[in-house]
Image (cartoon, rainbow, N blue to C red):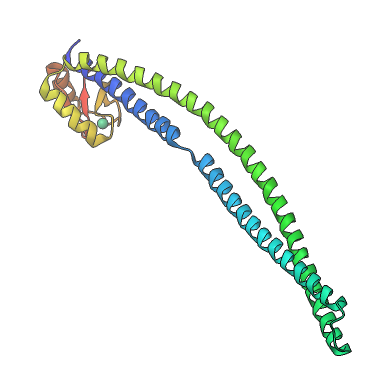
Amino acid sequence: MNDYASLIKLQAIDLLLDKQAVLMEGVLKGLSDSTAIDQLSAKRLAVEKELSKLAQSQSKLQIELVEYKDKISSLTKRMYAGTLRNEKELKGLQDEITYLESLYAEKEESVLDLMVKTESYDSMLLSVDEKLKTAKDENQERQKDLMASKHDIEILISEQQIERDKVVKNITKTLLDSYTQLRIKKGGVAVSQLSRDMCGICRIVIPSSELQQMKRSREWRKCSGCDRMIVVG
Ligand SMILES: [Zn+2]
């Protein structure tokens, strides 16, 4: 294989390696992506926090209910203890009991509200847990596929790398340097093959005198259209 045939082969390998690198980037990104699980876990945490707040409020209310009940019962006892001196005192006591009973009913209503809310958050937690489980299962499957792809890409890359090392040995250092620099500058494709009397990439026509010179010397020349190395294939 002459220098140029090797150079063309090298370019084909490098383009394949570029493609594999892009694929690998996608695979690695996929492997580290846990957005769905993270979002659901955050939601779960928020629901749990709300449930704990609700439980706290409920237990606070339960304590208050017991306190009201005790107060009402002690006032009721006083009412029937026969120690009241007059109607006014009795009326005062009755009013206080009625007031406490209305407060008690109010708190009881609040406890019921909290229980309803708790129930709805409980079912929300169940649904989030189900979704989380599905997301985790799906993620596991996806990770398996991605790991398989990663393995395939790694094998392909190492095979191509071995091939590349062989091909590079056939190319002179000066030519390889020009190729490497142009590849960076051109973002991948550095070499163009002569296609009849045109640059194989930008299709600019090469003046016949230059064309003859090129074919005679078999030296590469810089394309005036795309700046790439045109080689006689
Ligand atoms: Zn060109």
Task: Classify residue 99 as left or right of residue 29.
Answer: right
Asked whether the viewer can see residue 74, the reply is yes
Task: Classify residue 49 as left or right of residue 21.
Answer: right
In the picture, the quarter occupied by the C terminus is top left
Q: Position of residue 112 (x, y in %)?
A: 76, 59
Q: Where in the image, quadrant-wise, is ligand 1 located? A: top left
Q: Position of residue 131 (x, y in %)?
A: 62, 38
Name which residue lies at 87% across and 89% down: 86
Whether 127 is drawn above or below 83: the answer is above
Task: Classify residue 56 as left or right of residue 209.
Answer: right
Question: Total label count?
Answer: 0
Q: Position of residue 31 (x, y in %)?
A: 44, 32
Asked whether the viewer can see residue 225, the reply is no
Name which residue lies at 31% across and 24% down: 17
Q: Report the front residue among 15 and 1.
A: 15
Whether 99 is drawn above or below 220: the answer is below
Whether 147 is drawn above or below 82: the answer is above
Q: Report the front residue among 181 and 77.
A: 77
- Place residue 130 in its image quadrant: top right
Name which residue lies at 14% across and 27% down: 177
